[in-house]
């Protein structure tokens, strides 16, 4: 591929759904099963040429996605609407392409993303369902939802989220804008925590969930969350919630897609 030769290649955007249970995260890792490896292998099988896949974000091991967005460049002349059935025919059953479209040459799934929405699911029943075990955190404990909602308000807006970031991340700044953090019990006792932000730090969502659960369990107060936020000290926040309950719902690029 020659840089700038926009007539010779295409930039294809995919929306991907996957069950992350058996994968070691999105990013390719030598000798380990990852979503990126499976996607790149499938694309090479269909197009007969290797293409690097770029994602909106690298989900961790065991994390799922309903609306992960990726892009790749290719010389292949396959009609864009044929990528969905072609790729799905060679991908494993726990990864599916939901849609494909031609993207502008400069489109970048990661750098062009404006907002990302994650949802975390918690089952508080004494006996969890075998059918949801890979997609929810089985807590088996009553929670004070009203206190959790009060605590959640302290995390909405532009803040330094250093207290909710695990070490090992590559972020240059800890400031993020959380424009939505909702706690709902849609199918009681199934609890959902939805969080939308312009970006997330390493394990930020799962640490926020773990901290809110500490409030719900009565181990800390809602007001404590404000103190934890401003302290910028990860040691004060709650534990990192298990990966199985987390799902990337959608990525917004400011174009309604």
Image (cartoon, rainbow, N blue to C red):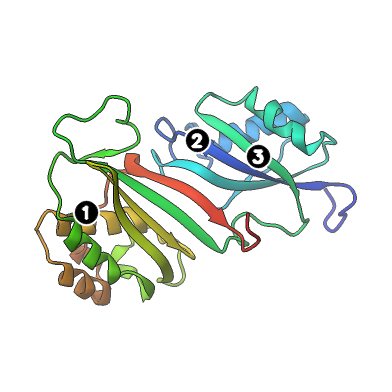
Of the numbered discs 1 and 2, the one sitting upstream in the chain is 2
Q: Which residue is mark 3?
A: 99
Which residue is most to the left?
A: 218
Residue 34, placed above or below residue 184: above
Which quadrant would the C terminus be assigned to in this image? bottom right
Q: Residue at x 67, y 29 (%)?
A: 87
Closer to the camera: disc 3 or disc 1?
3
| Rendering quarter of residue 229 | bottom left
Q: Which residue is mark 2?
A: 18
Q: Residue at x 69, y 27 (%)?
A: 85
Determine the secondary structure under disc 3: strand
Residue 110 percent coordinates (x, y): 59, 57
Q: Nearer the viewer, residue 150 or 36?
A: 150
Left or right of 104? Residue 167 is: left
Residue 206, placed above or below residue 147: above
Closer to the camera: disc 3 or disc 2?
3
| Rendering quarter of residue 128 | top left
Closer to the camera: disc 1 or disc 2?
2
Q: Residue at x 16, y 60 (%)?
A: 215
Left or right of 174? Residue 78 is: right
| Tag of residue 182 | none
Determine the secondary structure under disc 2: strand
Question: CB of mark 1 within 8 Å of CB of mark 2?
Answer: no
Distance in Å between CA atoms under marks 3 and 1: 36 Å
Residue 168 percent coordinates (x, y): 38, 57
Residue 41 percent coordinates (x, y): 64, 30
**Badge 3: residue crowd in 10 Å (few <14, some 14–19, many ≥20):** some
């Amino acid at each position: 591929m020659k840089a700038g030769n926009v007539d010779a290649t295409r930039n294809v955007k995919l929306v991907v759904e996957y069950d992350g249970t058996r994968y070691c995260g999105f990013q390719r890792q030598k000798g380990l099963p990852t979503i990126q490896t499976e996607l790149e292998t499938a694309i090479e099988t269909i197009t007969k040429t290797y293409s690097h896949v770029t994602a909106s974000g690298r989900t961790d091991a065991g994390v799922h996605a309903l609306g992960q967005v990726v892009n790749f460049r290719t010389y292949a002349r396959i009609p864009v609407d044929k990528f969905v059935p072609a790729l799905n025919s060679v991908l494993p059953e726990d990864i599916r392409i939901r849609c494909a479209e031609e993207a502008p040459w400069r489109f970048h799934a990661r750098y062009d993303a404006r907002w990302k929405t994650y949802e975390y699911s918690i089952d508080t029943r004494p006996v969890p369902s075998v059918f949801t075990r890979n997609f929810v955190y089985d807590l088996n404990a009553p929670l004070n939802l009203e206190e959790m909602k009060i605590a959640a308000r302290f995390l909405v807006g532009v803040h330094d989220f250093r207290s909710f970031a695990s070490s090992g991340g590559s972020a240059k700044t800890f400031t993020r804008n959380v424009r939505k953090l909702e706690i709902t019990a849609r199918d009681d006792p199934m609890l959902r925590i939805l969080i939308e932000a312009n970006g997330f730090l390493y394990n930020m969502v799962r640490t926020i969930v773990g901290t809110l659960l500490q409030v719900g369990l009565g181990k800390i107060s809602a007001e404590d969350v404000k103190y934890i936020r401003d302290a910028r000290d990860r040691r004060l926040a709650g534990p990192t919630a298990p990966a199985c309950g987390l799902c990337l719902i959608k990525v917004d690029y400011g174009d309604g897609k």
